[in-house]
Image (spheres, grey):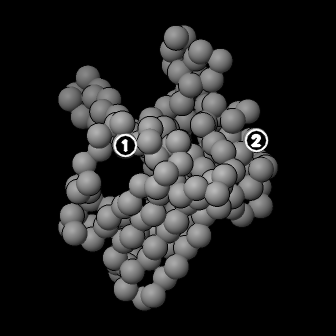
Amino acid sequence: MTSSPPYNEFMIAIPVEQIDNDGKQEIPIYYIFQLPVTTQEACDAGVKYYGYPKFVAQIDYQEDGETTRCRVKAEGKDIVSLEVQSLSTTHQSLDFCTYSVKNEKLLKTLIQIEGQAGLATDSKGAKYFLGDHPVSIEIMNLKMSATPTRYQYAPRLQSILHRAREVLSL
């Protein structure tokens, strides 16, 4: 088992619906659109082993008890600022999968996370603002809704990334 020093990341992902033969989706699945991280080591490993579109960025958090703010910047430009209302949390174990592309192959990776988290379906509890970085322009071009359907507040999480497996040659 390999571990890396602690770092922060900000996942910008697109939910994927993958229905099994019984008409159900087992666990949440996301296509990783962009994945800024705070260390070069985390960036290099994510790109090399998982094909994740990682890049090094400055990720700053501010908490005032009621609200948590996160600001992501790279190359001196703002990418995104996120503001969420703090929620009561419980210890949770959550599994989800990601899709990424490496060497013209679609990869699927199981990620298991554990820690303190809370989930809300209140659309007023979270908002984001896009900056002037090229990644912000790409996000704008996706024409995402400015109103979230839900948000998760997770002040402390640890994760295990399992080995990526190839699911399709592109």
Q: Nearer the viewer, residue 121 or 72?
A: 72
User: Measuring 71% from the left and 63% from the top, which residue is drawn there?
Assistant: 6
User: Which residue reaches farthest bottom?
Assistant: 65
Q: Is residue 115 visible?
A: no
Secondary structure of the residue carrying numbered label 2: helix
User: Measuring 34% from the left and 37% from the top, which residue is drawn there?
Assistant: 142
Residue 98 as seen in the image, left or right of residue 36: left
Mark 2: few/some/many CA within 10 Å (<14, 14-19, 20+): some
Task: Indicate the position of residue 162 as horizontal and vertical percent values.
Answer: 62, 40
Which of the two discs, 1 and 2, labels the residue nearer the N terminus? 2
Secondary structure of the residue carrying numbered label 1: helix
Mark 1: few/some/many CA within 10 Å (<14, 14-19, 20+): few
Q: Amino acid at mark 1?
A: Met
Residue pointed to by mark 2: 44
Dot label at residue 140: 1
Q: Amino acid at mark 2?
A: Asp
- In this view, 73 is above or below 134: below
Dot label at residue 25: none
Task: Indicate the position of residue 32 as horizontal and vertical percent values.
Answer: 49, 38
The picture quadrant where one finds residue 50 is top right
Distance of mark 1 from mark 2, alpha carbons? 27 Å
User: Measuring 60% from the left and 37% from the top, which residue is drawn there?
Assistant: 53
